[in-house]
Each structure stands twice: as structure tokens, then as C-alpha cells.
């Protein structure tokens, strides 16, 4: 995590000339965000009409939650609900 700056210079392949200036390129690795905070497991007794449970989680401002159907890999779940 951090930044480093390198400078690129163009050189002619036959060894003749080099660019008069160098172009800065900064490489930055930012820290990964922490895992979201779960809204907690939900349990509901069967009823009529069928109840709908919706998974919830929160993250700090400037971040979003993306839901998956597996702990690793898997597919994105657009609406994490259970109603059957």
C-alpha cells in the first residue's frame, strides 16, 4: 500500500538520441476496504401471505455493497431476498 513515481524517457533504438524530458508515472496501491457489517441473520415462521426477508449490510460512506451467492467466486445477486 502506497505510491511510487517512475520517469519514462524515450530512446532511439540505434543509440542516437534520447528525449529531452521524462514523463512521470505514479503507481498507487490503495488499501482494500474492510468487509461490510451484516444486518444479522433473519428467521421468520411460515405464514400466509408468505413473508419476504431481505439481507442487509452496511459499509462506510463512499463504498457500496455487492452481494454474491458464494463466499468465493459465485455470481452477483441483484436483490438478496427470500420469499418462498
Image (cartoon, rainbow, N blue to C red):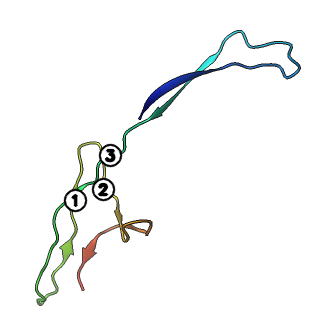
Secondary-structure class at tag 2 = loop
- Of pointers 2 and 1, the one earlier in the residue sequence: 1
- Image quarter hosting the N terminus: top left
Residue shown at the point (24%, 86%) measured from the top left:
84
Give the x, y percent position of residue 42. 15, 73
- Of pointers 1 and 3, the one earlier in the residue sequence: 3
Q: Which residue is disc 3 drawn over?
A: 33
Residue shown at the point (74%, 20%) measured from the top left:
10
Give the x, y percent position of residue 81. 26, 74
Residue furthest out toward the top:
20
Q: How many marks?
A: 3
Q: Given this view, does label 1 or label 3 mark the residue nearer the observer?
A: 3
Q: Which residue is disc 1 drawn over?
A: 57
* Marks 3 and 2, how far apart at CA: 11 Å
Q: Which residue is disc 2 drawn over?
A: 65
Q: Residues within 10 Å of mark 1 (few under 14, many from 20)?
A: some
Q: Is residue 25 above or below residue 73?
A: above
Q: Residues within 10 Å of mark 3 (few under 14, many from 20)?
A: few
Task: Kindly check if marks 2 and 1 are in contact, taking CB atoms under 8 A apart as contact.
Answer: yes
Amino acid at each position: 500500500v502506497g505510491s511510487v513515481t517512475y520517469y519514462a524517457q524515450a530512446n532511439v533504438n540505434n543509440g542516437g538520441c534520447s528525449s529531452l524530458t521524462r514523463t512521470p508515472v505514479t503507481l498507487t496501491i490503495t488499501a482494500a476496504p474492510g468487509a461490510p457489517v451484516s444486518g444479522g441473520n433473519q428467521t421468520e415462521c411460515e405464514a400466509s401471505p408468505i413473508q419476504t426477508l431481505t439481507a442487509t449490510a452496511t459499509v462506510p460512506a463512499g463504498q457500496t455493497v455487492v452481494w454474491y451467492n458464494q463466499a468465493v467466486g459465485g455470481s452477483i445477486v441483484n436483490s438478496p431476498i427470500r420469499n418462498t
